[in-house]
Image (cartoon, coloured by chain):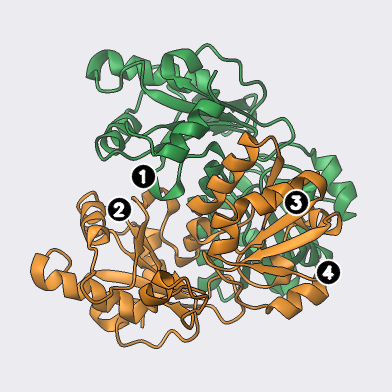
Chain colours: A orange, B green
């Protein structure tokens, strides 16, 4: 009996690998992780009818706080945890694998494309990316700015920065958390526009990322409705990228020839 | 009519996505790129019998120098170019896409897992990797050492480094190149051991990467015979990782808790 983490890739149900498909066919229980990423071109119902099995949605609480329940189940059943993108791109799933190994539960991982490599679609070369940053939603009295410094550092080293934008699904307000009420906030997905606005907010104090810095906004990468637009931060801030998920590349100050051509190709 | 670049993922034929499989079924011609990466668990024959079509092997010359031939073919036929891993992880395929776009040829890209994201398997967190480096085979009078400086820079920023190790397939000696003779050297794939030896050669002059630096050697990632071993560079240099493909992570000086546990898990 095995816990198998299956990457779904980036867009629709058919982005699953044949190996992943087989694992699902052999599964006694199928969970879909919904809090680190999201399916773009397919709904839960699409996925269920495609695989011919019912799927239980797993939020942060079920995967992190109730991991033991998943592991106990995987001792006696084949349990598949579906994850949009690649299963090991998020720390939380690495942690789950580690717990499973420590508990003597068989674990398998079936990899797939994720934003980390598919961002090559922008034309920016993968070997020219520095550290990835995550941009979190600013809250009242909480505007963490470590991502800003990392972008600056990458720019100084003439490297691109992949910015992953915040996802808040089935999160509880502090008040509801304190009262242990299972009341969830509506899902929020950060847009390219908000990400740039937050960068500018920090830039008002730090003055290291000028508004004419070149960047590439990316929406729904890998899906039929994917949108890629290149321009300055100031320009991209005004572009409507549509539905989630969004991400962004802050370009290295100097682009190589192919990168320069691709930048123009996606230019707004 | 379309040129479709299909990522094969990391291990065996069943790592292809359903979308990739469909593209192959609709293809009039199928090429397999053999010079930036390689299939691990499957031979060309396995792949041919699996997809039920014959496959033409494409080396650097056919893809780079004879790109126009591929593009001309894609005007009148559905041409699929299969690439181990993800199709856009190598510059050469980005270049091919760009040429196709400029020539008005339809291009589609079907992503898959690549070493760039599957390296998460080591337990090292993807968001803690700095710039990727490629370690080339040293030749007589040619020992480029820019990769060494990049590793040092990542270490100073407390980031991991993914080291991609050189692959030489259907390369010609300088003499044969000069005489335009189509005589190819036997394929060479750099092992973890050679990579470490080359790092040590540079370290004899630069003294920035001590032999007790922690690293993780990875062989045949994603395949049935995958091997992951963690230790100091000095220790890993003596480990036999077996058949290609190999790669290596030079760890950040400080590991997080989960990383530390995974390092121990793979410890030699």
Instruction: Give the Cα distance between marks 1 and 4.
Output: 41 Å
Residue A53, numbered circle = 4
* x and y, in percent, of residue B114 in the image: 58, 48
Q: Which residue is mark 1?
A: B131
Asked if the residues shown at circle 1 and circle 2 are in contact, with their CB atoms under 8 angstroms apart, the answer is yes
Give the chain of mark 1. Answer: B
Asked whether residue B165 appears in the rendered view, the answer is no
In the depicted view, which residue is nearer to us: B177 or B111?
Answer: B111
Q: Position of residue B231 (x, y in %)?
A: 47, 20
Which comes sooner in the sequence, label 2 or label 3?
3
Residue located at (72% from left, 75% from top): B1
Q: Residues within 10 Å of mark 1 (few under 14, many from 20)?
A: many
Which image quarter is the C terminus of chain B in? top right
> In which image quadrant can residue B221 be found?
top right
Label 2 sits on a secondary structure element that is loop
Residue at the disc numbered 2: A159
Note whether B109 is above or below B89 in the view shown: below
């Amino acid at each position: 009996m095995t816990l198998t983490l299956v990457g779904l890739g980036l867009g629709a149900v058919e982005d699953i690998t044949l190996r992943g498909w087989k694992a699902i066919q052999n599964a006694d229980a199928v969970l879909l992780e919904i809090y680190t990423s999201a399916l773009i071109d397919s709904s839960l119902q699409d996925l269920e009818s495609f695989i011919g099995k019912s799927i239980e949605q797993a939020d942060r609480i079920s995967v992190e706080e109730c991991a033991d329940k998943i592991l106990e189940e995987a001792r006696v059943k084949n349990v598949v945890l579906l994850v949009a993108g690649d299963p090991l791109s998020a720390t939380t799933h690495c942690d789950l694998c580690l717990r499973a190994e420590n508990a003597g539960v068989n674990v398998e991982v079936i990899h797939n494309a994720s934003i980390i490599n598919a961002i090559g679609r922008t034309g920016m070369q993968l070997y020219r990316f520095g550290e990835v940053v995550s941009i979190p939603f600013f809250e009242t009295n909480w505007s963490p700015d470590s991502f800003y410094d990392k972008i600056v550092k990458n720019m100084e080293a003439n490297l691109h920065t992949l910015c992953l934008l915040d996802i808040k699904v089935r999160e509880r307000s502090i008040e509801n958390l304190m009262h242990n009420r299972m009341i969830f906030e509506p899902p929020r997905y950060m847009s390219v526009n908000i990400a740039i606005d937050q960068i500018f907010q920090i830039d008002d104090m730090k003055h290291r990322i000028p508004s004419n810095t070149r960047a590439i906004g990316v929406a729904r990468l890998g899906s039929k409705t994917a949108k890629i637009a290149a321009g300055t931060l100031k320009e991209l801030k005004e572009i409507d990228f549509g539905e989630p998920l969004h991400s962004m590349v802050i370009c290295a100050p100097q682009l190589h020839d192919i990168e320069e051509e691709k930048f123009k190709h996606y230019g707004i």
